[in-house]
Image (cartoon, rainbow, N blue to C red):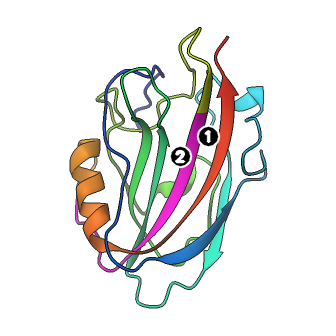
Amino acid sequence: MALALGGCGRHAPAPNPTGPVGTLTVTSEAFADGAPIPTDYTCTMRIPPLSWSGDLRGAASLAVVVDDPDAPNGDFVHWVVLDLPTSTSKLTGESSISAAHEGNSSEGQRGWASMCPPPGTGTHHYRFTVYALSTPTGLPDGTEPTRAIKVIDARTLAKGTVTGTLVAS
């Protein structure tokens, strides 16, 4: 799998589903919601572990989007995972998504773009959002984040987010 080195430059809107949306509980062993992300996961290609739970009735697949709404040029998408099986309840990095597809990050490359905010840009809030989808997206690896997010929006039954912070030095 291709991995992209991070920077927060291009804009891609975060998913914003319309209509009734259920709730998933998303957590990370690496950080608490709203707390700083450990340096082991910053400016590196390491992805913090994620776990989730909630009512997945009616869901046919899952998606994960990691984004930074505080990026200098607007929302920066760090990772898009599409069509995870609904039996999945955690991710421990890219190796755990073998049954899914990865879209492109805002850098234009497939895979994870590291969380490394540009110096002097203040506090960044990295949102790790898991979506339960009514149908698989059917999108291939390398789908642009804007297209992937539009498809996720249209299929979202439930979602949950855990947010970690980083202060740009």
- The amino acid marked with disc number 2 is Glu
- The amino acid marked with disc number 1 is Ile
Foreground pick, 45 / 124: 124
Which label is found at residue 112? none
Whether tag 2 and tag 1 are in contact, CB under 8 A, the answer is yes
Counting residues from the N terminus, which is met first, the one under dot 2 or under dot 1?
A: 1
Q: Is residue 147 magenta?
A: no
Q: How dense is the environment of label 2, judged by Cα within 10 Å: few (below 14), some, or many (20 and up)?
A: some
- In the rendered view, tell whether residue 71 sits above or below residue 87: above
For residue 129, side relative to residue 168 (left or right)? left
- Residue at the image position 41 percent from the left and 83 percent from the top: 59
Q: Picture coordinates of residue 5 (x, y %)?
A: 47, 21
Q: Is residue 98 visible?
A: yes
The quadrant in which residue 38 appears is: top right
Q: Picture coordinates of residue 9 (x, y %)?
A: 37, 20
What is the magenta range? 125-140
Q: How dense is the environment of label 1, judged by Cα within 10 Å: few (below 14), some, or many (20 and up)?
A: some
Foreground pick, 99 / 49: 49
- Residue at the image position 73 percent from the left and 35 percent from the top: 37
- In the rendered view, tell whether residue 168 sits above or below residue 55: above
Total marks shown come to 2
- Residue at the image position 61 percent from the left and 40 percent from the top: 47
Q: Is residue 127 magenta?
A: yes
Identify residue for label 1: 47
On-image quarter of the N terminus: top left
- 3D distance between C-alphas at marks 2 and 1: 8 Å
Identify residue for label 2: 94
> Which label sits in the foreground, 2 or 1?
1
Q: Picture coordinates of residue 12 (x, y %)?
A: 31, 38
Q: Picture coordinates of residue 156 (x, y %)?
A: 36, 72
- Residue at the image position 56 percent from the left and 55 percent from the top: 96
